[in-house]
Image: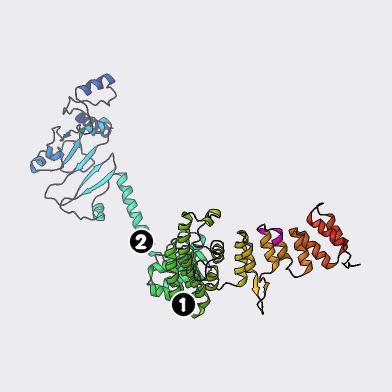
Amino acid sequence: MSALNRRRESQDDQEEYWMKSAANKNKFNIFDDDVTVETAEELAKSKKLLTQCDDVDLVNWDDTPVSSAISEGIVTPDSASSFPKPSSSSVPYTRNIPPYMTHSRSQSESFGVSARVSFTPSRESSVPSIQYSKSQERLHTITQTTRDLRLEDAISGYKPAASGARNQEEEIQYLRRALKKAKELNFSPDDTIRRMMLGEPYSLEVFHSKEEKLQLLDKAIQVHDGNAITAVILFLRQTVKPSLFNLELQRRPVAVSHYVSYLRAHYDFKELGNVLGMLNRTEEAAILKYRQAISAPDVRGKMSALRGCLKAHFLPEPDLTHEANLVEQHASLLERQWPIEDADSKSEAQGNLVFKQYPRKVSILNMPLITTLYYNCFYHGRDAENLLTSPLAIKTQHQLSDKQYIWTALSARSRLKQWNGIEELLTAKGWFGNTKNVSVIGFDKVCEILHRTSAPDEILSKYLRLIDGSERRLNLAKKYKCHDVVVETLVHLRDRAELQVYASKLSPGSRGLKTAQDALRSSTIKWKT
């Protein structure tokens, strides 16, 4: 009981010691419980506020103010000697108090705020000082003479006095152990590929040697996982020399296929062209370059790119002779379309009659060959063969067949209602200078084109009569309602019954009905029995 009483008396003496300090008695804290609103306003007007910045009173153990040098963290011999040593008669304190310690009275525990203690060594000492703020629970290590002291040395030299510092030290130790454990782990290609297939976290950076990387690639190919193969290939491309990468890639056709697909899907055409050329896949490389050339938005740039592609990738390869001819025709067509478009645009702006009657809907640039031929047959059908706009010049240069030319030219002239021009297209000279009607596409196709463009019945009947085969001619005549041709064909077939049925369907007083009645009354026709 005596020990307990002495301890209580010691605590009461300490409380009495701290509370009897007379430093700055004229200042008050407006946040105290016994301060009213009116008193706080009066204090604010009289400029006696207790703020966070100016209400820090540093006192010694004997309740005397501390000099400004000590309050700024600078200790001089004079200020150091001003601190009294605790007497031996006082109650022993459980903590080891440094020789120089300052106390912030305004933040002392008597006001309900955590204390802030500063440990400051002498100027000659090379041991770093420690400032500890209990309210923030942080450990600050400040060196004066040893600026490059390591964190491990600073922590090991002092024992943390707060839970925050201990937590920080434990976290540092945990990270060290985790790093050491990660370095000791043995990542195998099988385990890494398994993780990649299952979608688990993995790392390819742990594989450093060439052999390990190639084993990883072979394992990915072995399990037939496309995503893993592509990931390992990209890792190889980033970590090995290009020559070694290309060499190992050539030895693995499956990896090549996945890599080529990846480059094509990501539009990396430059690298794709290099890979195809390295693999001696010249046809694919040439087609790739051709696609790049025709994707140019500008016509002049497209023409230049096509010529360059033809010279670099098609002409040197004997196996690509046919493809080279097609690329040549494409470039020639663009070179023909460009001046035609320029001239026709100017002519249309000047008010040409043809362009007024049949306005152009789209530009001729980048149009297909047959469309270009139709355009020139429509607007420049009578031009001489030595001009760029001549349809015959297009037919000759691009090696079009007679059927392609006749069909296109006939469609254009039929739309323009140029019936004499159609006659010229379908007329050929015989052996002895006489002329006859000939159609390489067949007169049934000619009648189809004429009917689509609403040709007159006389013109349509004229070419219907030239169709070989009575049954075929009869069916088309009925389809196109050319009654004269139907009657003539039925008379030729001597089918009186069919003619009577057909005549009954005709309108009274029509020309077709009159022709049918005259044929039925004729006595010179020998009908089938």
Residue 426 seen anywhere in this rendered image of the structure: yes
Residue 415 placement, left or right of 186: right
Residue 115: give its label: none
Q: Amino acid at mark 2?
A: Lys
* Residue 136: % across, % down: 29, 41
Residue 180: give its label: 2
* Residue 329: % across, % down: 50, 71
Q: Residue at x 25, y 37 (%)?
A: 115
In the image shown, does 397 or 101 lie closer to the viewer? 397
| 90 is within the stretch colored magenta | no
Quadrant showing the C terminus? bottom right
Q: How is the image coloured?
A: rainbow
* Pointer 1 with pointer 2, Cβ within 8 A: no
Farthest right residue? Answer: 529
Residue 191 seen anywhere in this rendered image of the structure: no
Farthest top residue? Answer: 38
| 456 is within the stretch colored magenta | yes
Q: Amino acid at mark 1?
A: Leu
User: Label 1, on which residue?
Assistant: 315
Residue stretch rendered in magenta on the structure: 452-459
**Dot 2: element:** helix
* Residue 169: % across, % down: 31, 51
Q: Residue at x 23, y 41 (%)?
A: 94
Q: Residue at x 56, y 66 (%)?
A: 370
* Residue 250: % across, % down: 46, 76
